[in-house]
Each structure stands twice: as C-alpha cells, then as structure tokens.
Amino acid sequence: MKRFDLVLFDLGATLIWFNGDWETAVREGIQSMQQTMVKLGYPLDDSFAQHYRETAREYYRWRDDNLTETPAPEVFRRILAEYGYNTIPREHVDAALTALYHATQSHWQAEEDALPTLEELRRRGYHIGLISNAGYDEDVQVLIDRAGFRPYLEYILTSAAFGIRKPHPDIFEAALNHFGVPPGRAVMVGDFLQADILGANRLGMGSVWITRRVDLPSSQPWLERIQPNHTISTLGELPTLLENWG
C-alpha cells in the first residue's frame, strides 16, 4: 500500500528553472510593458519604470509579511491610478502584463527529469497537483503549457487566483479538499523551506525539499527551524523515495 495518495509540487525552481539573469529580464519586461501602454495611448514618462519597480518591491515585502496575494492586474491598476489613469479597459491591462511577463517566460525551462517524473508518478497511481506562489495566474498557466505539464496536473492552484500565499494553511487545505485527501496522505515537493516545507509540516503533510536550485549556505539558518521529512537533489529520485518512505 502506498504511503501517499497525493503529490503536490511547487513550480519555480522545482519543476522549472530560470535560465538567465532575472534582474535583466525584469528590467526588459517593464520597459516592454511601458512601451505597450504608450502605444495604447497612455504617455507614461521615464519615471514609470523606476516607480513600478519601487512599488512592486514594497508590495512584495507586504505580501510576504501578510501571506496575502493581490493579483498583478490589480497592482498594475493601482500604479496607473497614480498617473491619473483610473479607468482602464481590461484588454489594455492584459496587453501590458503579457508584455511584462513575456520577458521572463522565455527564460523558464522545464527540468529535464520533470516530465519523466510526472509520468512515472501517474503510472504508479498518484494524484498530482501544483501550488504556486505567483502574482499572475495567467503567467503560471503559460509556463505549464510551454513545459507540457498540463496533462499530468489534475489541479493547479496559484496564490494569485486564491488570494493567499504559502505557507498559509488555507492554500494547502484548498488543494487537499479538492482531492478529498487528508494531510497525512499527501506530500509537498518544493525548493523553498519557508513556504513549501513549513506549510506542509504545519498541516501534518509529508515534505520533500528539492535542493537542485537552492543556495544551500543561505538556507542553513532556516534548517535549524524547518526540517523537511526528506531531501532530494533531483526529481528523478522522487518516485522511489515515495515508495520507500520511512
């Protein structure tokens, strides 16, 4: 008898990895977003890019403290309101955010063992889901489709769609309730101790920390307080680990 019925994955640095310089890609994305808005009739000046970055950083600090997610369209609308644009068509917001996220999407790549692992887990009869802390649900959906993961993921939950971020128990419980699986029959696999592992541990789920993309030295202080049940360096190790859980 299997120890678990449900395997939940994180996305970034777990199933996919970022091949490039993040800051450069974000800078290019903001520039592209600004250019898109100008073409749509919003003459944003050169201060916009810096103001957007500063506002986003402040918001990121706030959401990490409160574990509450305000979707990217709403954050963007609030920034534009400061420039006097209070009523913006949905399609204009979507176009701007598409331009922003396109700059980073092209750098995300599936881990080479991600699809084989998902296939093997499905073959062995596990339910498979995903919980991602992400400000823009549409971005996650694009990344999942590009990587070819959708046929294997029975449930995809983002903090943007749910409004709450890991490690808050509510977002984990939403996934568990979807599958009708108790915490003790589910395992969370992720790279972020403070979100994936802490959240799973608090609920009594199994927890697997994948370290392939982790800065291990900077994680050591957190390991004193957050202990995963198991640690792996590749996804390929996961099916055997789950079968021999102890």
Image: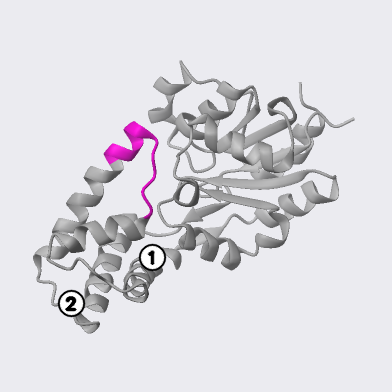
Which disc, if any, is residue 101?
Answer: 1
Tell me if residue 220 comes above or below residue 13 in the rendering. Answer: above
- Does residue 51 appear left or right of residue 158 in this picture? left
Highlighted range, magenta: 61-71
Residue 22 in the magenta stretch? The answer is no
Residue 161 badge: none
Give the image quarter of residue 229. Answer: top right
Image coordinates of residue 165 in percent, x first then y, are 45, 39
Question: Height in image: 107 above or below 32?
Answer: above
Q: How many marks?
A: 2
Q: Residue furthest top?
A: 224
Q: Could you tell me residue 130's position as x and y percent?
A: 61, 47
Dividing the picture into quarters, in which one does residue 194 lie? top left
Foreground: 58 or 69?
A: 69
According to the picture, the residue beneath numbered tag 2 turns out to be 42
The quadrant of the rendering that contains the N terminus is top right
Q: Is residue 113 visible?
A: no
Amino acid on which disc 1 is placed: Tyr
Examine the structure image and report whether residue 64 is included in the region drawn in magenta. Answer: yes
Where, quadrant-wise, is the C terminus in this rendering? top right
Classed neighbour count for the residue bearing mark 2: other residues with Cα under 10 Å, few (<14), some (14–19), many (≥20): some
Q: In the rendered structure, which amino acid carries the disc numbered 2?
A: Tyr
Which of marks 1 and 2 precedes in the sequence? 2
In the rendered structure, the answer to whether residue 90 lies left or right of residue 133 reads left
Q: Is residue 208 left or right of residue 42?
A: right
Q: In percent of the image, x 52 and y 38: which residue is there? A: 191
- Is residue 196 at all visible to an observer of this figure? yes
State the residue at coordinates (27%, 73%): 32
Residue 151 falls left or right of residue 211: right
**Residue 47 appears at what percent x and percent y?**
9, 64
